[in-house]
């Protein structure tokens, strides 16, 4: 993707929302199935995306003339991190996925009121949204203070479980990053083990943006005197299946 910047600050947001059937300032929100259209709105040359067709891998990388990167926050809440991050990184197209409608509406209102041109909110589960993103298309996944499910019998409900980590790996560009921050050591520890066991991922020494310490949840934990645990993982240069994508019929 060329490194040129946006030429019209408001256009990408407006176009993506209207093409995907959502209207700025209304109660309508983008849904996971709108994601292909959101991507096409910023990269008009992208053919219709078939989530099962791995041939679309990396296509976003080459086609957008507005954005250098595609970044996704899973569980963006009210959008505290997203808004701050998007201001600092105008060349990233940032998609925040959130399962709670009220939080999506708050995040969308911030985007609208503050004219943030590079942020989109998707109302739905991250698991579903991921299916609509092409493999090899996401530069960075952000997961900040996801629900911890502290009881061991509920651990399987955590977002960062084996099958979802595999999915994140598939959606990442080679060299792409996952940033994960939690106040709960057990979640951090188990995720670290899962990453170490995951062929194709490796731990990274990169650190997430300082903005993660400004969110409502971050402030709550820091006010309580709780430390937070930070983990970064990177998709390895050569991961299994990377060079020979499986193309569905
Ligand atoms: C503790 S909050 C953190 C919000 C935000 N990351 C922050 O730091 O302010 C976790 C958020 O993840 C959302 N969430 C939980 N499971 C989700 C899923 N499967 N897909 C999308 N969002 C999810 C919750 O609704 C909640 O808003």
Image (cartoon, rainbow, N blue to C red):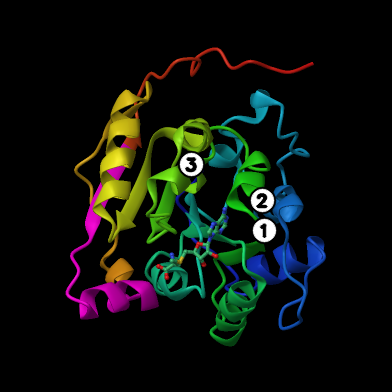
Q: Residue at x 47, y 48 (%)?
A: 154
Whether the magenta-drawn stretch holds residue 129 is answered as: no
Q: Is mark 1 within 8 Å of ligand 1?
A: yes
Vertical order, 214 against 186 (above or below):
below
Of circles 3 and 2, the one toward us is 3
Q: How many marks?
A: 3
Q: Residue at x 40, y 74 (%)?
A: 84
Q: Label 2, on which residue?
A: 39
Q: Earlier in the sequence, mark 2 or mark 1?
A: 2
Q: Earlier in the sequence, mark 3 or mark 2?
A: 2
Q: Is residue 55 left or right of residue 218?
A: right
Q: Tell me the crowding category of disc 2: few under 14, some 14 to 19, or many 20 or more residues within 10 angstroms, Cα based.
A: many
Q: Is residue 67 left or right of residue 102?
A: left
Label of residue 156 in the image: 3
Vertical order, 45 against 167 (above or below):
below
List x then y, in percent, for residue 65.
57, 51
Vertical order, 11 against 156 (above or below):
below
Q: Is residue 229 left or right of residue 122?
A: left
Alpha carbon of mark 2 to alpha carbon of mark 1: how far? 17 Å
Whether the magenta-drawn stretch holds residue 220 is answered as: yes
Q: Label 1, on which residue?
A: 124
For numbered disc 2, what is the local secondary structure? Answer: helix
Alpha carbon of mark 3 to alpha carbon of mark 2: how far? 31 Å
For numbered disc 1, what is the local secondary structure? Answer: loop
Q: Nearer the viewer, residue 188 or 91?
A: 188
Q: Earlier in the sequence, mark 1 or mark 3?
A: 1
Q: Residue at x 37, y 25 (%)?
A: 198
Q: What segment is highlighted magenta in the picture? A: 214-233
């Amino acid at each position: 993707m060329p490194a040129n910047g946006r030429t019209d600050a408001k256009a990408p947001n407006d176009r993506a929302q209207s093409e995907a059937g959502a209207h700025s300032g209304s109660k309508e929100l983008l849904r996971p199935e709108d994601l292909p259209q959101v991507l096409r709105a910023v990269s008009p040359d992208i053919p219709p995306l078939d989530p099962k067709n791995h041939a679309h891998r990396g296509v976003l990388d080459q086609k957008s003339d507005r954005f250098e990167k595609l970044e996704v926050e899973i569980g963006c809440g009210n959008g505290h991190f997203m808004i701050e991050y998007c201001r600092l990184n105008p060349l990233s197209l940032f998609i925040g996925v959130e399962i709670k409608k009220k939080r999506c509406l708050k995040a969308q209102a911030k985007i609208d009121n503050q004219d943030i041109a590079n942020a989109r909110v998707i109302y739905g589960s991250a698991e579903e949204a991921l299916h609509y993103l092409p493999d090899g298309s996401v530069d960075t996944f952000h997961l900040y203070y996801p629900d911890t499910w502290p009881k061991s019998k509920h651990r399987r409900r955590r977002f960062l479980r084996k099958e979802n980590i595999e999915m994140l790996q598939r959606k990442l560009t080679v060299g792409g990053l996952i940033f994960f921050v939690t106040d709960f050591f057990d979640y951090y520890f188990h995720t670290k083990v899962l990453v170490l066991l995951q062929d194709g991922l490796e731990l990274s020494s990169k650190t997430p943006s300082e903005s993660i310490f400004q969110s409502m949840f971050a402030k709550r934990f820091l006010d309580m005197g709780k430390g937070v645990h930070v983990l970064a993982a990177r998709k390895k240069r050569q991961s299994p299946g990377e060079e020979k994508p499986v193309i569905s019929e």
